[in-house]
Amino acid sequence: MRGLCAWLAIAILVSSPYPLILPFLFPPAPWESIDFGFILICVVLSIITFWSGIYACRMTVLAPRDEPIRFNRLRRKVYVYRCHHDGLRPFSRTAWRVRSEIYDWDDLRAEACSIYGPMGTGGLIETVTLAVVKPGTNQVIDRFHFAHGIQQGEMYWAMALLFMQQGPHALPHFSRPPRDWNNEDVSFNLARRLAPKVQWPADIDLESRTAP
């Protein structure tokens, strides 16, 4: 889907000037006055289309290939590789960047969310996020995505609990190695080909892999 969205973003950008051409394609008759309302609508539509195209391009190309989460049992810390974006500022450099954040394991809570999306016949959207609470309280100060679907989120959260409470020996055995988006063949996916690889900062990469 991300590769498809990259081509759709290009199509949106290419089509953004067309609303400006409409007043010239359908000029008023000599006996008619100029319809400034129609011209204004065409200009606003062109700006919105261009804005949406830039946002879609940055979402599909600048976001990293993956957003991994590392759990360090010995330090009781969770390291999150997140891509921050702002739809109101699609040209900003500071609002669009990847940040590595560190949270205390004891301050995390799993939250299941189920809503109906704006689809033709209604669509159920289920996600699981991890909420960061203020120490000693239930006040949420931050949230980040954890899993698509409540069933998948429950499975991932159960494995995280097993690892943090009992260690790696408590985890189930998987016959296949974990997926690594950095080393996967993405030749037919434009978005993943252009997307930057996951690269943790050196200090956080070392800290997240070692004991105190």
Image: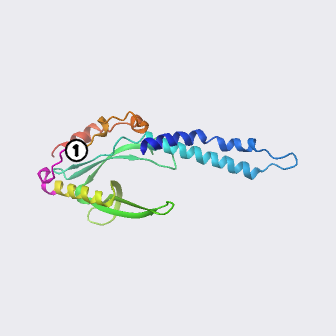
Magenta includes 170? yes
Residue kind at label 1, given as amino acid type: Ser
Relative to 154, say whether 64 is above or below.
above
Q: In this view, does 36 lie to the left or right of 45?
A: right
| Residue at (32, 62) in percent of width and height | 111
Which residue range is magenta in the image? 165-175
Q: Can residue 91 be seen in this view?
A: no
Query: How many residues crowd mark 1 within 10 Å: few (<14), some (14–19), many (20+)?
Result: many
Residue at left offset 38%, top offset 33%: 187
**89 and 41: which is toward the camera:** 41
Image vertical order of residue 210 relative to residue 127, above or below: above
Q: Position of residue 46 (x, y in %)?
A: 63, 45
Q: Quadrant of residue 22?
A: top right
For numbered disc 1, what is the local secondary structure? helix
Task: Specify whether residue 51 is painted magenta.
Answer: no
The residue shown at (14%, 50%) is 168
Q: Number of callouts in the render?
A: 1
The structure's colour scheme is: rainbow
Left or right of 139 on screen, residue 51: right
Q: Mark 1 points at which residue?
A: 208
Q: Position of residue 101 (x, y in %)?
A: 31, 48
Residue 7 position within the rendered picture, expressed as x and y whole percent measured from the top left: 49, 40
Q: Nearer the viewer, residue 175 or 165?
A: 175
In the depicted structure, whether residue 163 falls above or below residue 137: above
Note whether residue 139 is visible. yes
